[in-house]
Image (cartoon, rainbow, N blue to C red):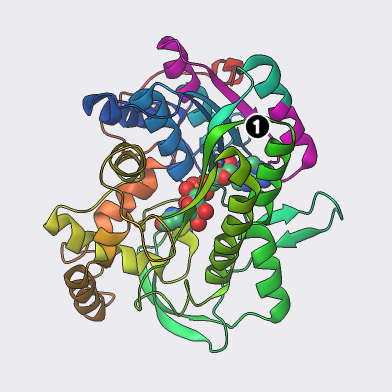
Amino acid sequence: MLNFKQNIRGNVALGINPVGLKQEVLNQINYVKNKGTYEGPKKVLIIGASSSYGLATRINLAFGAGADTIGVSFEKGPKNEKNLGTAGWYNNIAFKEAAEKEGLIAKNFVQDAFSHESKQEVIDYIKNEFGGKVDLVVYSLASGRRTDPDTKETYTSSIKAIGEPVVGPNINMQNEAFYTETLDPATDQEIHDTVKVMGGEDWELWMKALKEADVLADGVLTTNYSYLGTELNRPYYGGGTLGRAKADCDDKAENINELLADINGKALIVVATAVTTKASSVIPFFPVYCIGLYKVMEEKGTHETPIMHQDRIYRDMIYGNNPEYDETGRLRPDSWELDSDTQAKTKELILKLNEGNFNTDLTAYNLFYKEFSNLSGFMVDGYVEQDITIDELKALKY
Ligand code: NAI
């Protein structure tokens, strides 16, 4: 029997529990099913589909709108008892199994989405086995590296400030510590490289390839998740390298809108709320913002996990009656986070934090830690221990 052990280095989770991951996917499916069905897209491609926002989107569209889905992700399967692979690997498997039980198509491509070959394989599949067209393309990729498919040069993204260094509090979940961190300003090269990795270039390449291959339905929609935040995190997020990458996505949305005009298509930037994910846990200072923000939002009844947020985005906003757009046409489900009273209370709370109180009931540290653990299959509601061997894990197919 395998012994699943939670193993955290800094704010990076190393150990996983595949049984817990499956339960977590089932919990998200139940959340959507309990809300009932809605009219939405029927053929969906999700790029970055195996965890957090991409996975939640896929679960929502499949179990809420009855969509067939193609998911592209970059994950690793089990090798031996010490190396069980990555969480997203098991999320893909659990999703597929549940979706197929409902008679839905759930195709997984586990490969580098940045390459031309990946795009071609997905296009061939859409043409030959997926009915020929997709009506929604969701771009939810988060990566630290990208190899340019033409030059083959590999770029690495940096999470850094721009101009001035930023000094502020951060937490380390491995040691349950609260400490002061300094974030250096990025060089021009680092800014450029971060935009190459996390900006909109690959999104635009995907949309061009899909359009050229004629696999986009008339009226196709493509969404891309952005984050703007507030004055509380602007110095290291919106005003830093990641903010530049997100601004590049805004620019690329305009290009894509032109590209899709003749098929009545649309590119939509969705400014999503702050949530606990593999990517967001390693953004310096961001966990401190989250433990303050979540506490305030919990008290107001507005705190959301990725599945709750994505359900609201697609069911209530995009395919429902309550979309909120800003003056540049971006969808703004982040309005609950940006609410002025929520922000004022979060600021007041964060300013009170120190080593002695950051992990007490004053904040949502315990909630953040639980949500972080859930991403690896630990502390999952409804979890039941199971005897499972490495051979059984290896036999699971995505
Ligand atoms: P995540 O790290 O949980 O998921 C990233 C996904 O991208 C995974 O499915 C992974 O397999 C896939 N991926 C990474 N590299 C790949 C590659 N080379 N080829 C194929 N797939 C690859 O990320 P998260 O946090 O869900 O972020 C998704 C998007 O949402 C990002 O654009 C992020 O900036 C945005 N966002 C996140 C917020 C947050 O608080 N976490 C807030 C608002 C927006």
- Percent across and percent down for residue 249 are 57, 60
- Percent across and percent down for residue 317 are 31, 44
The answer, for residue 14, to whether it is visible in the render is no
Amino acid at circle 1:
Val
Q: Measured along the vertical axis of the image, is residue 90 above or below residue 371?
A: above
Question: Which image quarter is the C terminus in?
Answer: top right
Q: Residue at x 13, y 58 (%)?
A: 300
**Label 1 SS:** strand
Q: Measured along the vertical axis of the image, is residue 29 above or below residue 362?
A: above
Disc 1 within 8 angstroms of ligand 1 (CB) = yes
The number of discs equals 1
Closer-to-camera residue (216/232):
216
Residue 112 is inside the magenta segment: yes
Q: Quadrant of residue 231?
A: bottom left
Q: Residue at x 37, y 64 (%)?
A: 287
Residues rendered magenta in the picture: 95-123
Left or right position of 121 against 142: right
Left or right position of 340 against 139: left
Left or right position of 51 against 215: left
Residue 392 is inside the magenta segment: no
- Percent across and percent down for residue 355 are 29, 75
Of all residues, the one furthest to the front in this rendering is 262
According to the picture, the residue beneath numbered tag 1 turns out to be 110
Closer-to-camera residue (375/95):
95
Q: Measured along the vertical axis of the image, is residue 96 above or below residue 294?
A: above
Q: Quadrant of residue 381?
A: top left
Of all residues, the one furthest to the right in this rendering is 151
